[in-house]
Each structure stands twice: as structure tokens, then as C-alpha cells.
Image: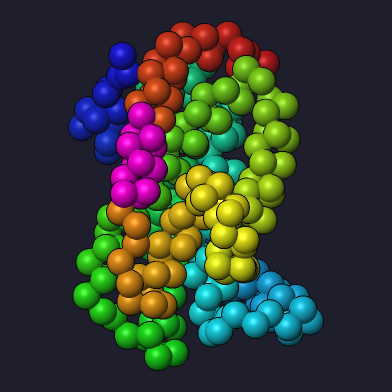
Amino acid sequence: MFSLRILRPEYIELVIVKVFMNLKSEASRTYLSFLWWILEPVMTMSVFYVVFGVLLNRRTENFTEFLLVGLVTWQWFSNTVTHGMNAITQGSRIILSVDIPKEIFPTIEILMDVVKFGLVLILLLGFLWLSGFPANYHYFALPALLVIQFMLICSVTFLVAALVPFFPDIKFLVMVLLQLAFFLSGVFYDASSIPIEYQHYFFMNPMALLIDSYRLVLLEAQSPNWSKLGIVAGASLVGVLASLGLLKKLHYAYPRVLQP
């Protein structure tokens, strides 16, 4: 089974310190410091708004808010997987020197992106409230949605981080799959625009379901489909446990493959 050594106090402290130091170091490399974490998704949203909201004249009501919810949700997933898949490879110097749980390295990347996402989420909620989408009692569903997406992110990130040191070409496959998933997740179009006979297959994509669920809660004051979300949560939990088990199984193989 998988290892829970990462839950030891000394490893928890190590993860927290590394997350703080890495964030501080990353912010210090730009003139705008941590503001860049906010400006980057805003600029990305602006590009998509110009393309789909202005040039292609999308007819979706409240398109700015609609697009922003989709992009913020998607970027949390995409950025974390992209950063995390190289985590073990980038930690090769430490791995070759010290015997520590390998899941520490993708965990650090995951938590760094949680901090960045948290800042953007706060701004998103403020923007929605000012735009006429006030908080409602369906907001109680938000913590559950965030936990489900977090488990999904962990399952995918741990898996690709475990495999990339052995098969570096997987990085290119992951980037292609992320690009494909982006266009299949309804970031800039409404699921209702898909023919009804294909909507079942559309929502088999967990990110499409999550993005639609966030929009239901934040923009339409409706409850999401908990039965489908329960399936995503269960599958994500199994994925996390399986990925941790894989990391444990490959624990002693990493120093060999990471040798310069």
C-alpha cells in the first residue's frame, strides 16, 4: 500500500517551509512580485474575451463572468499538473543526497498553486459580487467543489510526477492532452450548446463537470449534480491512493534514473 511518511511532523514542516520559500523566491524574480499571479489569469481571460466575446460574438449571457469562472477553474488544474509533472526531476539533487518520500516534491508544487489559486478565487468572488452575482446559500457547496477538484488535481499530478523521471516524453503527451481537455471542458462555451445526445459524454470529462458546477453555484444560484460529482470524488480518491502507491513502489528506483 501507499506510504504516509509525508504526514510525519518533520516532513510537514519541510513542505510548509519549501512552499513559503519557493513562493517568495518566485515573487522576487519579477518587478510585479506576487501581483503577477493575479495579472496572468486576468490577461489570459482578456485575450479569450476579445477572441470569443468580441471577434466571434459569442451569445452567452454575462459572457465575461461566464468565461472568468471557467478560466480560473481550468487554470488551477492545468497549472498544477504542468508544474507538478517535473517536480521529482527538478528535485534530483536532494533525492540523490537524502532518502525522503518522493511525494513531497509534487506536494510542494500542488500547495504553491493552491496559494496562487486562493488569491485569484478571492478576486473572482469579489468581481462576481460587484457584477450582480451576490453570495447565495448554494455557496455552501463551494468547499465540497474545491475539495473534489483538489483531489482530482492531486491524483493527476502525483501520477505524472511519478512517471516523468522514467519516461520524459510523457511531458509532451501531457501538454497535448491538457490542450485537448481545455477545448473539451467548456471553458468558453456553454454545455447547453452541445447536442443533447452528446452531453452525457461531455460530462464524463471531470473538468467539464466541475466547471459547469462552479457556474451553477456562482452564476445561477443552483445546486450542482452531486451524484456525478460523487463519482468524480470517488475516482479521484482512488487515483490519489494509486498514485501514492506507485510512488512508494518506485521509491528506490528514482536515484538510479536521476543519476546524471
Residue 24: percent from left, percent from top: 46, 56
Q: Residue 76 in the image: state x and y as whole percent.
A: 49, 55
Tell me the magenta residue range: 227-238
Q: Can residue 196 be seen in this view?
A: yes
Q: Nearer the viewer, residue 43 or 102?
A: 43
Q: Which colour scheme is used?
A: rainbow
In this rendering, position of residue 12 left or right of residue 129: left
Residue 89 sits inside the magenta stretch: no
Residue 205 versus residue 255 in the image, above or below: below
Q: Quadrant of the C terminus?
A: top right
How many marks can you see? 0
Q: In this view, does 177 lie above or below 214?
A: above
Q: Residue 134 vs residue 253: left or right? A: left
Q: Where is residue 105 in the image (x, y as percent from the top left)?
A: 45, 33
Q: Which residue lies furthest to the front in this view?
A: 197
Q: Is the magenta stretch mostly helix, strand or loop?
A: helix
Residue at horizontal 53 percent and vertical 75 percent from the top: 66
* The magenta stretch spans residue 233: yes
Residue 142 location, quadrant: bottom left
- Residue drawn at 27 percent across, 22 percent down: 5
Which residue corresponds to the image point at 65% horizontal and 82% vertical from the top-left? 59
Say if residue 22 shows up in the picture. Answer: no
Q: Position of residue 141 (x, y in %)?
A: 27, 63
Image quarter (top left, top right, bottom left or bottom right) of the N terminus: top left
Question: Which residue sits at x=62%, y=73%?
Answer: 45
Quarter occupied by residue 50: bottom right
